[in-house]
Amino acid sequence: MRPPLRLWFIVVGLLLAPNDVSVSGELDLISPIDVPGEWRKLESEYRTQVDDLREKRKERGEKAQSVNEKLDAIDFAKVSEQAKQDMDEGLRDMGESLGDAFTEYMSGPGKRSNVLETGRILLTETLPAFEQVLDAEYAEVDMQFEMEQLQSELSGYENEMKDFDKKIADLELNADLSKKVAETYEQQLNDTKTKTKEIVFKLVETSRAVKAVAQEKHDTIPPGWLACTCPNDHAGLGRLIKGVRYHEPGHTCPAH
């Protein structure tokens, strides 16, 4: 990423010429591109990514808070008590309606009017009461299922936020490193204006060392990370290292 400083010599041999040979030369310390500016730009890109991730994390946090509020609002004891009341009421209504239907039918067995009235009682009174009994019977089960669903949703948001936190931390480290490299370049470039050519060459060596460290850090696979065999499915996980996507264990890939 970092181009070396451009050294232009009118007379080649400034470094190799014998001491008794007079050599005139011109040293141009202007870099062909704004190297510190490029590192500043890279830092800005990292900061922008951090801001985007923070916004996404905030969104997940708000959703997690909403799910938490739903979980807190669930009163299992109250649901159980209400289910018992509904069950008793449904059984009572069902018994009464069945009694009414039986009485109606027996008051005129086979008569069309009695059969129709018996059917009406069964459909409009007995059946709703029976459905109420069933709802009451499964109320606690349904509530438990809803709680598990909410807990699963909450766990998903929490895991996403953890992933965001790790990515944010990594990007912030990269941004800080880019800033330090830019500051180092700026300071060194200022120093070279007044220092000897030895300082210039030292600057080049230091720059290469910084680049090597940065490259090594970027190309190092974090401990425990795995090469992804389904990058299309896991496009949002981990990061690309030398063209291969790596991510933390725990995300299932077909080959893992």
Image (cartoon, grey):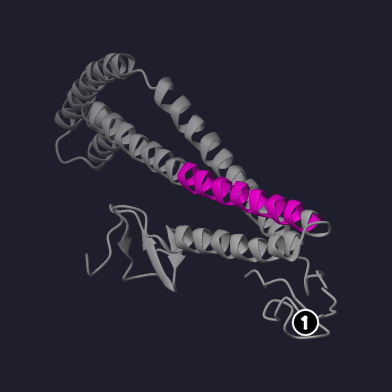
Q: Residue at x 51, y 43 (%)?
A: 169
Q: Nearer the viewer, residue 104 or 22?
A: 22
Name the image quarter holding residue 46. bottom right
Q: Position of residue 212 (x, y in %)?
A: 51, 64
- Magenta-drawn segment: 164-190
Magenta highlight: main SS: helix
Q: Nearer the viewer, residue 61 or 47?
A: 47
Q: How many dots with numbers?
A: 1
Q: Position of residue 193 (x, y in %)?
A: 83, 59
The answer, for residue 185, to whether it is visible in the render is yes
Q: Nearer the viewer, residue 219 or 200?
A: 200
Q: Position of residue 168 (x, y in %)?
A: 53, 45
- For disc 1, the marked residue is 21
Q: Secondary structure at mark 1?
A: loop
Left or right of residue 171: residue 229: left
Magenta includes 249? Answer: no
Which quadrant is the C terminus positioned in?
bottom left
User: With respect to residue 28, does 194 lie above or below?
Assistant: above
Q: Dot 1: few (<14), some (14–19), or many (≥20) neighbours within 10 Å?
A: few
Three-letter code, disc 1: Val
Which quadrant is the N terminus positioned in?
bottom right
Left or right of residue 178: residue 64: left
Q: Residue at x 29, y 38 (%)?
A: 123
The answer, for residue 233, to whether it is visible in the render is no
Left or right of residue 194: residue 60: left
Q: Residue at x 71, y 81 (%)?
A: 17
Name the image quarter holding residue 9. bottom right
Magenta includes 177? Answer: yes
Name the image quarter holding residue 226. bottom left
Q: Position of residue 98 (x, y in %)?
A: 19, 27
